[in-house]
Each structure stands twice: as C-alpha cells, then as structure tokens.
Image (spheres, helix red, strand yellow):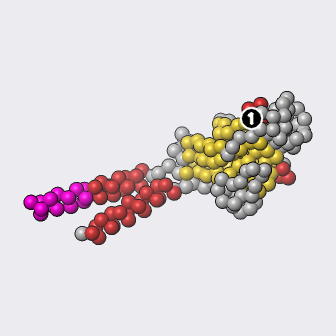
C-alpha cells in the first residue's frame, strides 16, 4: 500500500510543478542571450545588455537590459516586445531608475503595457532626488482579458540632452493562468491522498483496538 502513497505524492508534486511553472511566452526576458534577441530597441545604440551598472547587478542570471536617455531632449529611449496573453496570465518583472541629473532637469522613466497605457513602473529625478535612484523594483500585472499586448520601457532627458539618466530592466516573464483541467486534477489528487491517509489511520486504529 505504500506504493499508493508514493504514486499519489508523485502526482501531486508533478501537478504542483506544472501549475507553478506554466508559462506563456516572453522571449529572452532575462537577457541571458547576452543581447536584445526578442526585443525592439530605439535608438538601438542607447540600449545594451550588461552584467552590471554602477551598484546594480542582475536580479536573475548574468545580464540585464540598460536603457540610456540621450535620444534627444524629451525623446524616450525605448525597449519593447509584443506578446500574446490569455485572461488570467500575469506579467512580472523588475526595473530600476538612476537619475544621473539634477533638478530642474526632471528626467523620467517608465515600464508600461502600451495598450491602455498601463504603468507598471515609473520614476523621475523629482521622485528620487538629484542623482538619486530606486532599488530594483518588482512589478506585476494580471490581464483581465485575452489579447495581443506590448510591454515597453522608456527613459528620457528633460530640458536638455546632457547627464543622461538610465533605466534597468530584468527578469520579465509571463506566467500563464492554470488550466481548469489542471486545477481539477490537482484537487482530485489532493483529495485522494487525504482520503487514503484518513483510511490508513482508521485501519491502524481498529487494529490497535
């Protein structure tokens, strides 16, 4: 009968793993290719993949994307990727902003979902102070409906095009909502395991009596 326990435990573990690791597709979200594969940068010369910047190191893996302002006064340097998501899918990631300028030159940065202008992360010189910075900051958004979406990060110089501020982006991923069939199978496996444990306890007690 111990084999029954082993089989049920394996089933529960496998289903739990599949639920946690079910992922939709964001290409090269941790930039571990060492380049911008899967992403669109504009202007390309102001976006790079780095292993460190100042005091910042990657959140995940060995690399992250670094966007530098400097395209022109008031013009964002951007990095974007278009993807499909189902209702209930969640996009996750990390970003930081470092102000390499001072007020009144209020450089700013953002990470957003273009459709609906949903802001996932934002900061500016006025928010962090002269030459200030944020830590790596986690962001997440769950899509209420299915569709095609674009995640976009941007940073710009304000008032002049000197002392360019930067934006870091790392570990962007899209975690898929569990399929109802997977949830049902998981629930059945847990129920079966609990029932079997209960039956064993009752049987053991009756033997002791």
Which residue is label 1 attached to? 128
Q: Position of residue 208 (x, y in %)?
A: 12, 62
Looking at the image, is 161 positioned above or below residue 20?
above
The reply to whether the magenta stretch includes residue 128 is no
Binning the other alpha carbons within 10 Å of mark 1 as few (below 14), some (14 to 19) or many (20 upward) gives some
Nearer the observer, 65 or 80: 65
Callout 1: SS = helix
Indicate the quadrant where residue 5 lies.
bottom left
Specify start and end residues of the magenta stretch as a single range: 195-209
Residue at x 27%, y 69% (from the top left corner): 2
Residue 2 showing in the rendered view: yes
Residue at x 71%, y 44% (from the top left corner): 96
Q: Position of residue 108 (x, y in %)?
A: 78, 36
Looking at the image, is 10 positioned above or below residue 43?
below
Taking the view exactly as shown, the residue that stands out farthest to the left is 209
Q: Position of residue 8 (x, y in %)?
A: 33, 63
Residue 115 showing in the rendered view: no
* Magenta highlight: main SS: helix
Task: Quadrant for the C terminus, please.
Answer: bottom left
Residue at x 75%, y 50% (from the top left corner): 55
Residue at x 65%, y 36% (from the top left corner): 118
Left or right, 131 with respect to 138, comes to right
């Amino acid at each position: 009968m111990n084999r029954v326990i082993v089989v049920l435990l394996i089933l529960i573990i496998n289903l739990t793993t599949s639920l946690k690791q079910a992922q939709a597709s964001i290409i090269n979200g941790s930039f571990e290719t060492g380049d911008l594969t899967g992403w669109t940068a504009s202007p390309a010369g102001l976006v790079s993949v780095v292993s460190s910047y100042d005091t910042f190191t990657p959140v995940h893996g060995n690399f992250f994307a670094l966007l530098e302002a400097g395209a022109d006064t008031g013009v964002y340097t951007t990095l974007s990727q278009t993807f499909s998501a189902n209702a209930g899918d969640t996009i996750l990631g990390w970003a930081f902003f470092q102000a390499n300028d001072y007020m009144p030159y209020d450089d700013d940065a953002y990470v957003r979902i273009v459709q609906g202008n949903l802001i996932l992360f934002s900061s500016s010189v006025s928010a962090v102070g002269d030459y200030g910075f944020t830590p790596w900051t986690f962001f997440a958004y769950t899509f209420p409906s299915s569709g095609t979406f674009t995640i976009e990060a941007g940073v710009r110089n304000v008032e002049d095009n000197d002392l360019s501020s930067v934006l870091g982006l790392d570990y962007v991923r899209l975690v898929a909502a569990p399929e109802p069939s997977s949830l049902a199978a998981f629930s059945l496996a847990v129920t079966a395991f609990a029932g079997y444990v209960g039956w064993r306890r009752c049987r053991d007690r009756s033997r002791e009596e």
